[in-house]
Image (cartoon, rainbow, N blue to C red):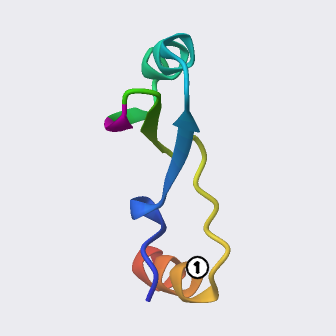
Amino acid sequence: MENIHNRRDIHLVTSEEAVKKLVIKINYKSCTIFSENLAGVHMSKPKLVFNKPTYLGMCILDIS
């Protein structure tokens, strides 16, 4: 089964200003620097959508 809580958005940015804009957001997790001009900014998903029937069925069973 897929765990949607572990999904991340990764933004590849080439300027320091773009990194600063992403770092101040609430869903910022970490940053990986690949080279002097390239960095990857890891962001968590701001909104989780439970669209898998196994999750919905399990939640209904847990509540009842």
Measured as percent of width and height from the top left, residue 14 is found at: 55, 27
How many marks do you count on the picture?
Answer: 1
Which residue reaches farthest front?
A: 36
| Residue appearing at x 42%, y 61% in the figure | 5
Query: Circle 1 sits on which residue?
Result: 56
Q: Tell me where the magenta segment starts and ends, as one range.
A: 31-35
Up/down of 57 relative to 23, above or below: below
Task: Looking at the picture, tell me which residue is in the foreground, 30 or 60.
Answer: 30
| Residue appearing at x 67%, y 74% in the figure | 51
Look at the magenta stretch and give its main secondary structure.
Answer: strand
Task: Looking at the picture, tell me which residue is in the foreground, 63 or 10.
Answer: 10
Amino acid at the residue labelled 1: Leu
Q: Choose top left, top right, bottom left or bottom right for residue 40.
A: top left
Secondary structure under the numbered disc 1 in the rendered image: helix
Up/down of 47 relative to 20, above or below: below
Task: Looking at the picture, tell me which residue is in the foreground, 28 or 54.
Answer: 28
Up/down of 8 relative to 18, above or below: below
Q: Choose top left, top right, bottom left or bottom right for residue 17.
A: top right
Q: Residues within 10 Å of mark 1 (few under 14, many from 20)?
A: few
Question: In the rendered image, which quarter contains the N terminus?
Answer: bottom left
| Residue appearing at x 46%, y 24% in the figure | 26
22 part of magenta stretch? no
Measured as percent of width and height from the top left, residue 61 is found at: 47, 85
Up/down of 50 relative to 13, above or below: below
Residue 25 in the figure: left or right of residue 34:
right
Task: Looking at the picture, tell me which residue is in the foreground, 25 or 16.
Answer: 16
Measured as percent of width and height from the top left, residue 2 is found at: 46, 81
